[in-house]
Amino acid sequence: MLLNLREYHRPVAETPDRGLSHALELFARREVRTAVLAGGDTLLAAHDTTIEAVVDLQGLGLDFITADANQAGLRIGALTTRAALAGHEAARASYDGILAEAARRWSGSVQRNRATVGGAVAVAAPNDPLLAALLACDARVVLADRAGEQQRSLGEFLARRTALLAAPAIITELWVPWPASHTGAALASVARTLADAPIVIAAAVVQRDGEQCGAARLALGGVAEAPWDASSLAAGLIGRPWTAAAVAALAGRVAETVRPTGDFRGSAEYRQAMAEVLSARALAAAWHRAA
Amino acid sequence: MQLDFILNGTSQHWEVAVNESLLDALRRHGIFGVKHGCETGECGACTVWLDGRPVTSCTMLAAQAAGHEVTTVEALGEHPVQGWKQTAGLSTLQQAFIETGAIQCGYCTPGQLLAAEALLRVNPRPTEAEVREALSGVLCRCTGYVKPVQAVLRAAARLRGETVEPLPARLDPPAHMLELPLPPDALTAEPPGAPAAQTRTQTSTRQPPLTVAVAEPKHVGVAEPKVDAVKLAQGKPAFTADVEMRDMLVGKILRSPIAHGYIKRIDVSKARALPGVHAVLTYQDIPRVVYSTAGQSDPIPGPLDFVSLDRKVRFVGDRVAAVAAETEEIACRALELIEVEYEELPAILDPRESMQPAAPVIHDEPDYVPFGDCDPQRNLAAHINIELGDVDAALAAADHVFEGEYEVPKVQQAPIEPYVCITYWDEDDRLVIRTSTQVPFHARRILAPVLGLPVKRIRVIKPRIGGGFGNKQEVMIEDICAHLTIATKRPVKLEYTREEQFMASTSRHPMIIKMRTGVMRDGRIVANEMRVLSDTGAYGNHALTVTGNTGHKAMSLYPADKGPDGRSHIRFVADVVYTNTPTAGAYRGYGVPQGFFAVECHMEYIARALGLDPLAFRLMNVIKPGEEHPMSKAWSEGREARPELIRTNAIAECARLGAELIGWNEGNRETGNQGGKETKTQAGKNPLSTCLPVSSPSLRRGKGVALVMQGTAIPNLDMGAASIKMNDDGSFNLLVGATDLGTGSDTVLTQMAAEVLGCEPEDIITYSSDTDFTPFDKGAYASSTTYISGAAVVEAARKVADQIKAVAGRMLDVPAAEIVLAERRAWAADGRNVTLAQVALESLHRSQQHQIMAVGSWVSPDSPPPFAAQFADVTVDIETGQVTVNKLVMVLDCGMIVNPATATGQVEGGMTQALGYALCEEMAFDSRGRMLNPRFGDYRIFTADEMPEMVVRFVQTYEPTHPFGVKAVAEIPLDGVGPAVANAVYDALGARITRLPLTPERVWRTLRAQR
């Protein structure tokens, strides 16, 4: 129970912008601790007694998935549910379906009907497969604040998440570029059971240029406080012949770099070892699919 | 605030609180089909449709539903006949749930129905995987999802207009036997001198020698629909919390943040001053009465070490104070206003430290009442020492002695309905306790002194229960709720949150078990020793009896009597110690799954070390029909022990059939296999698997087995009773003290009564567990209900049948002894007959008037063990350590099966709980004793979309100590999955893992150590 909640707001306007500005005004109040209410699954489950007001975003028209106007990528509204993303044709067709797969790989079917993509990004659970997949797909976060709209890479957003959202700002959508040709993508994870939240997950997107690596992105979950973009390490593969040894070496570097903390799902040492195993697997599978 | 929305097709204008969840608002308005199972949206019991899509209502503010359409189970369908009014009836899906046996406790049924119905509306032709995904958001702890999935698939076919094959009503005759490489005497050896009639294992259904019913059983052995299924399919308000009472207060408990210490100062004045607060109780406010929360027969076989509220706290989550307030919100605020200062003491979190010389004493209270060999000064809650034969001499004479240490975790029963209780004074100033309990009669007896009331001034009502599994064989919240009612004079409802359920209910005892086994070269076991360190947590409820059963059952399967003297040489020693962790208690299996993990992993180790076939080795040593239960004379739950004979035992047939079903001899199975033989895996097929292509070289496949036995009730102690009253239409009221928790016991008891009375189950109105109205029953535990309470029902039914026959004989002018009851009639030998309704009218209204009615009760000198063989087929990822179970097989000898649907449902659900024990369930604590994963998800229980294939078969024997030949079925499924999976992993990897659960990291570490 949100024990001290006393205000519920649902901004609605003729145009989403006006609704947004109303929402941002509400968040900007210093005297009332105000939280964003998307699906509600995380917020209500947290039982945070400091929250005094919520702003329900359901009236702002943020529940959409559509190709962008330039045909350069996919726009995913922040209030799109994980179920909607998991079932969306474009999400299933591009990047070998890892966005859809990652959206599905969290909680149960009923819960995914409320859990939103924007909520997932705002919460940034360290082992959320969707975050790892979005990072690997080089997604960008669209934020609305009182100055207007800004876009940031998801990696950058995650690095400064608390400060950016406190501005205040609202995540309005995610943007994912369409994959280049000869691109393959894959997830690799380990969990206590098949449907359990991963202990560690890796997401890789690889572009093939003949026998060389044209581009490579890699992200990991479960190895840091937030999902981690390891693409700067994966860049070491680019422009070189793709060999098992190169992948293994890169995976080794990933494992050397991560400094996970352990919990009841898996120790730090185990997570570090899995970062290596799963990075290698995800990269290899992505390369295989890129063929 | 005002909430305008559409509920089940009708516009609603409700006043709701801003912070009220949709779940709470719906229930406050009497929509009780929506259930509370957690507060984090993870169990799905609160599922409703929002604009046609299933969503959880506990993690939605009611305000979020404004402008939307909400649909609950109440809209799906209803009973077809409502007096003179006909309705559209139950939905196709509801009917399918009823006919397949998909409903056990029924608590998650509304959620499952809504999740599945939503799928069928958009996808009329779902695959099994799609059905499983749709159900994945609704946790079910009873069914193992097999029958709900089947129900959805059948409903889908019917809705498409297809003809659906009727479900088989009876069990198939036992399958043919297969050849196994067994020693010739392994399956046939009978101990010399045993009477042949008792030693022959029967493998086919046959009539009881003492026929109590018609020659061909009509209802016993048939998959009758559950007697409570229609109401549960509708989400009717049948559970404890599904009532409204004027002026009912909400109770809440303030819990200790420290693991061990004293309350130095407690100030409740601010809490008491808060408007809307009606009582705040601490140890200073109520009488101090020591008792045990264990729901067991009198006298309690354990220490009395618990008081309702104490100055000392013994685990994080222990009670500090209790509040009753007008609303949950006020009660929560009141808890925050209680000021407590603690004097913290060193805590014991590891049972290995409990008996160390300098360990702090957890129970130093002067009013502690010891039992047996307990020694609170050494933190010893119970000590057990059983010695059969001369173990040391037999070990010394053995060709080999194998030693091993095994460890099993603390896991939770996790019924989807948490603890919940409502107490109130009735108009006669009697205290009514409406509670989710397995033990209503024990609860009444135990609570009376605690509350300062005589037993006769307490009435305990057990409504429908949303799962128990031993968790509710405990009197754990009724006292506090009643104290609050006594303090306030008002009705009080006390309902645990899921976090409280994890932190402050009960769990399975974690144990560290050491085995030492003497074996001859040819595989004969001549001595067996088990030493157990069992952790009872902060209180000693069930301490002695749970751990005693660990040895009593698990060490009896192999009598270790294959030495020259033919005597059993078995030692069982256990220390059950206190720690500053949440209390352990009863959990389905009652100590036996722990024991069998050790025994069956150890057997695998021995067989492989000696180069013997693991199954053949076991069968060579297993107890045979006609033998005496080795432990029966040594120990009986702290009471007098008397000898018991194993009369029925088809374990060899179970093993053969199970081996065939798992493909035991396929794929070049061999000891110490190198793995990688087969690449087609369930993991590869399951859409959830993301790791590897199916042919990956890092996958290994293995198969494992475990043989197990349990007991059926506590001999010479467990008593059940029933009464049957005939009504003037020829129907009957069957009143039982037995406590149906969703297991289907009301149904099987009804079937047995119908069989004897020659009527249909629908002619019997069965009412279970109200201490004012129903006869005594010890409650639902020890797998006793069908056997003990069932025999009591048969006893009552026989007496009623005799009375019916006397009246009918008079009416037909033939001797009563000639009358046969069948098809709702009483028949003379010449074919003349009267209906039961005519008999009832004659008896109640016309001649020699009297009420046809009788009481039966039953206690048994025997506890005939059910036996079973469990098999697992696994895939192990050797790089990550992740174990995926592809298939589980269980073949059981549970005597005769009264209802194949409920019996298989019990087994499937039990195996699923055991699968969690094997792979993923574990209560984790930090270094200060705080539980780290007190919520679903973090505490992982299996969901519908990740289940392995499960195969269940019965090899029926006729157990002659019961009128219908039954033995127990409820607990034994928990016993063998853990070791079968561990042994399959051993088979796959050639590496032993001796600790559950087999988490990826544990497997990975074992493999790393092996390299």
Image (cartoon, rainbow, N blue to C red):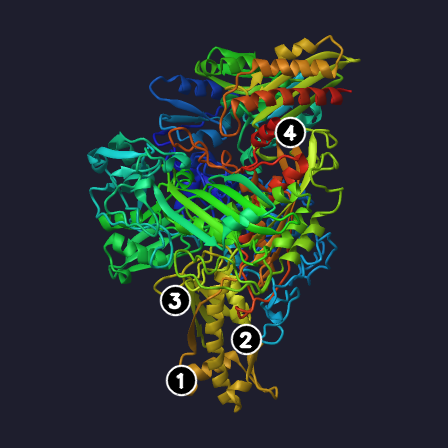
What label does residue B775 carry, if any? 3
Q: Check if mark 3 and mark 2 are on a common chain.
A: yes
Is the residue marked by circle 2 packed among few (<14), some (14-19), or many (20+) residues within 10 Å? many
Q: Is residue B763 left or right of residue A290?
A: left
Amino acid carrying mark 3 in the image: Pro
What label does residue B212 carry, if any? 2
B926 up-or-down from B15: above or below = above
What label does residue B536 carry, if any? none
B770 up-or-down from A81: above or below = below
Closer to viewer: mark 1 or mark 2: 2
What label does residue A101 carry, if any? 4
Disc 4 on helix, strand or loop? Answer: helix
Report the front residue among B790 and A67: B790
Of labels 1 and 3, earlier in sequence is: 3
Q: Quadrant of residue B300?
A: bottom left
Amino acid carrying mark 1 in the image: Gln
Closer to viewer: mark 4 or mark 2: 2
Is the residue marked by circle 1 packed among few (<14), some (14-19), or many (20+) residues within 10 Å? few
Is the residue marked by circle 4 packed among few (<14), some (14-19), or many (20+) residues within 10 Å? many
Amino acid carrying mark 2 in the image: Val
Write down the residue under mark 1. Answer: B849
Q: Are marks 1 and 3 in contact (CB under 8 Å)?
A: no
**Residue B419 placed where, x, y %?**
40, 46
B26 up-or-down from B726: above or below = above
- Label 3 marks a residue whose chain is B
